[in-house]
Image (cartoon, helix red, strand yellow):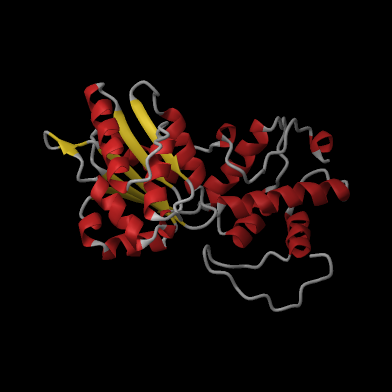
Amino acid sequence: MYLEYWGLEIFPYEIVPDLKFIYNSVHYREAMTRLTYAIQRRKGAALLTGDVGCGKTTLSRAFIHNLARKEYHVGLITNPMLEPVEFIREILYQFGLDPASHSKHELLNALGEMMMRDFKENRTTILVIDEAQLLSPTNFEEVRLLLNYQFNDRFLLNLLLIGQPELRGIVKRIEQLDSRIAIRYHLGPLGFDEMAQYVNFRLGRAGAKREIFTPDAFEEIHRHTRGVPRRVNNLCDMCLLIGFGMHAERIDAAVVRSAIDDTAMPDEEPGEAEPKKEAAKPGS
């Protein structure tokens, strides 16, 4: 809709994970370094947390994408809210197996055989569980027990738990699992300078040949989004739309404020939703 007006080839601020728009922030680099170390050194388990919209899922997809397929065997669980037997079946399925058995004992045997086979073939088995805070207590126990698969004092399974901040507290209360977490990292929001670079980076990826946002626009954007990437994307997308409608030459603070008013975006800390003080407008 506004692409031609702003000289763009594609929409720059979609909120679905897209590796083309990965921005190499300080938090991103540190998280990738720690996760890579955990896998390469077969540390057993790593924990990645972050507030809603800070890029956990995007980072995890990039991490998985970077793994050489011949050297690593990766299974990704995106819906951990399953009954225990179905949870184990889903793990096997995500590793490329489709067992006919519904026996938990046989499923675990199949999983153990797969991990040993990977080990003998010099492949690292990696299980990534997204939204891990949604795991039931029973499935947390299943996950913990999977870390008991070892050979010559080396973990046969490398586990990466990804979730919202409350995941840290949940894991801490499971002492036997918590003690197995060798690497931990919390993915935070972007600072002001990095947020401005992030906004411009995505514009460049989308084909922009000139600066579109003014310095005072960045101040308004950061003040209202606190640097949370998903909120930044939503606001910047609306800014481009409203700027297009206003025939603006650039996006300045006034356009940003119009976008904020239009979307009724509240000032709030990441992860802390404020109750709306006004009734919702018709059509909102």
- Quadrant the N terminus occupies: top right
Residue found 33% across the figure and 23% down from its top? 71
Residue 104 coordinates in the image, percent (x, y): 31, 47
Of residues 29 and 96, the one nearer the viewer is 96
Residue 181 coordinates in the image, percent (x, y): 25, 50
Left or right: 186, with 117 as reference point: right
- Quadrant the C terminus occupies: bottom right
| Residue sticking out furthest to the left | 152
Residue 263 coordinates in the image, percent (x, y): 74, 61
Of residues 282 and 265, the one nearer the viewer is 282
For the question of whether residue 40 can be seen, the reply is: no
Q: Is residue 177 above or below residue 112?
A: below
Residue found 73% across the figure and 33% down from its top? 10
Left or right: 81, with 209 as reference point: left
Left or right: 126, with 237 as reference point: left
Residue found 83% across the figure and 65% down from its top? 283
Of residues 51 and 2, the one nearer the viewer is 51
- Which of the 4 image quarters holds residue 8? top right
For the question of whether residue 8 can be seen, the reply is: yes
- Which of the 4 image quarters holds residue 155? top left
Of residues 77 and 200, the one nearer the viewer is 77
